[in-house]
Amino acid sequence: KQEVTQIPAALSVPEGENLVLNCSFTDSAIYNLQWFRQDPGKGLTSLLLIQSSQREQTSGRLNASLDKSSGRSTLYIAASQPGDSATYLCAVSKTSMKTSYDKVIFGPGTSLSVIP
Amino acid sequence: ETGVTQSPTHLIKTRGQQVTLRCSSQSGHNTVSWYQQALGQGPQFIFQYYREEENGRGNFPPRFSGLQFPNYSSELNVNALELDDSALYLCASSLYQGPDTQYFGPGTRLTVL
């Protein structure tokens, strides 16, 4: 059974710092991995999606890496800003989400606070 | 903003009651999924609807049911509410023929007393 964990559960950093959020999964047979952002009172926003054949994806100040063999993914945020404060969740999918959404497993999230 | 809306924003019910939550998908999206997110946890998949039919279901009992309408809006119905049903309920719309990207609504916070 796939289990997804995220460390740390909460993180507080001063503005401008670079930071890394971690995601671990127990079953390396994944189809893809996504990182989401969740603001209080709002739904999830997809940040980056990494297919199982890829090693990393980048979008602006965000970089996500994937190491299937070790069951790990990291989300790197460069030059953090107060607007980055949110909960970040990773989710792994065993198959294409179009065919089997029940195989999407979310981690519990990391709550990030960026202090001005 | 994703264009996915949900109503109501908050809801308080008592144990044993029934509840209906609503979701309006992003324009053009023909697939909707519903998730339950308990406090401090990641979302758990409830079910997905495509072309008005259930297209996949997670580990939830039959008292969780849904509908999708021709305009692709959707409802989540929960009967015989239990205290553990208290959670944030999220819907997400996507294009079945498109990439694996879902657009989430803001959620409905359900409290069962």
Image (spheres, rainbow, N blue to C red):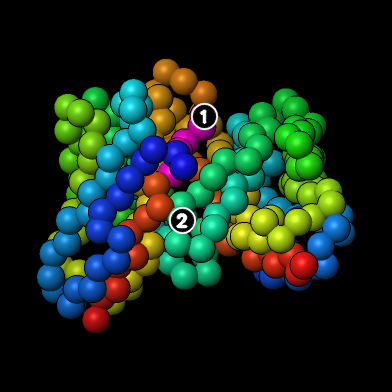
Label 1 residue SS? loop
Residue B80 magenta: no
Three-letter amino acid code at the position of disc 1: Asp
Q: Mark 1 or 2, which is nearer the eye? A: 2
Q: Residues within 10 Å of mark 2 (few under 14, many from 20)?
A: some
Judged left or right of residue A92, residue B5 is: left
Q: Position of residue A14 (x, y in %)?
A: 82, 67
Identify which residue is drawn at 23% across, 41% down.
B74
Q: Quadrant of residue B110?
A: bottom left
Main SS of the magenta part reads loop
Question: Residue A42 bears which disc, if any?
Answer: 2
Judged left or right of residue B107, residue A58 is: right
Point out the stretch of residues depicted in magenta: B100-104
Q: Position of residue B66 (x, y in %)?
A: 20, 45
For the residues labelled 1 and 2, the Cα–Cα distance comes to 20 Å
Quickly name the residue at label 1. B100
Judged left or right of residue B16, residue A67 is: right
Residue extending furthest toward the front: A116
Label 2 residue SS? loop
Identify which residue is drawn at 87% across, 59% down.
A17
Q: Are marks 1 and 2 on the same chain?
A: no
Identify the image quadrant of the C terminus of chain A. bottom right
